[in-house]
Amino acid sequence: MATTKRGIADTEAFSGLIRIHVLHHACTEGVFGLGMIKELRRHGYKIGPGTMYPLLHSMEKRGWLKAKTTRIDGRSRKVYFGTRAGKKTLDGARPKVKELFEELFEEGHDHHLHE
Ligand SMILES: [Zn+2]
């Protein structure tokens, strides 16, 4: 849970990555708050419901996600799916993430300042 100072700072630093991650899963299979918290935990992000639910709402407000209420085991659950705009944003992010990934992991590439 992002209750510690470091946790909050981490969440701030990773918020773009987390959004892209959520978008990816929302566009492929749909996400719900608790499931996404577990998924991110698996990836090493400690995100609590106090961070996840507002994040999903803000992404819905931006038009990237659309919520559908479904009933699972007699409980209603809000499942978020990627919209067309969400898919577009994800497609736009993909090459940028790839480039960042390469820069972070490829060593010996002397392109630090992109002269
Ligand atoms: Zn994932």
Image (tube, rainbow, N blue to C red):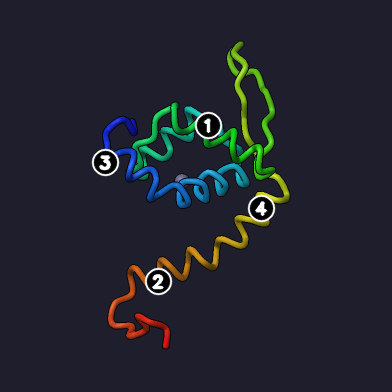
Select label 3 or label 4 by which is in front.
3
Res. 28 visible in picture = yes
Earlier residue among tags 1 and 4 = 1
Q: Find the residue positioned furthest to the top.
A: 74
Earlier residue among tags 4 and 2 = 4
Earlier residue among tags 2 and 3 = 3
Evaluate if marks 2 and 3 touch, with contact meaning CB atoms under 8 Å apart.
no
Evaluate if marks 1 and 4 touch, with contact meaning CB atoms under 8 Å apart.
no
Assess disc 3: are there few (<14), some (14-19) or many (≥20) residues with their C-alpha within 10 Å of its C-alpha: few
Q: Secondary structure at mark 1?
A: helix
Q: Which mark is residue 54?
A: 1
What percent of the width, then of the height, locates residue 85?
Answer: 70, 51
> Of the residues shown, which amino acid type is indicated by label 4?
Lys
For label 4, the residue is 87
What percent of the width, then of the height, locates residue 2?
Answer: 34, 33
Evaluate if marks 4 and 2 touch, with contact meaning CB atoms under 8 Å apart.
no
> Of the residues shown, which amino acid type is indicated by label 1?
Pro
Q: Secondary structure at mark 2?
A: helix
Distance between mark 4 and mark 2 Cα atoms: 23 Å
Residue placed most toward the observer, 67 or 13: 13
Evaluate if marks 2 and 1 touch, with contact meaning CB atoms under 8 Å apart.
no
In the rendered image, which quarter contains the N terminus?
Answer: top left
For label 3, the residue is 6
> Of the residues shown, which amino acid type is indicated by label 3?
Arg
For label 2, the residue is 102
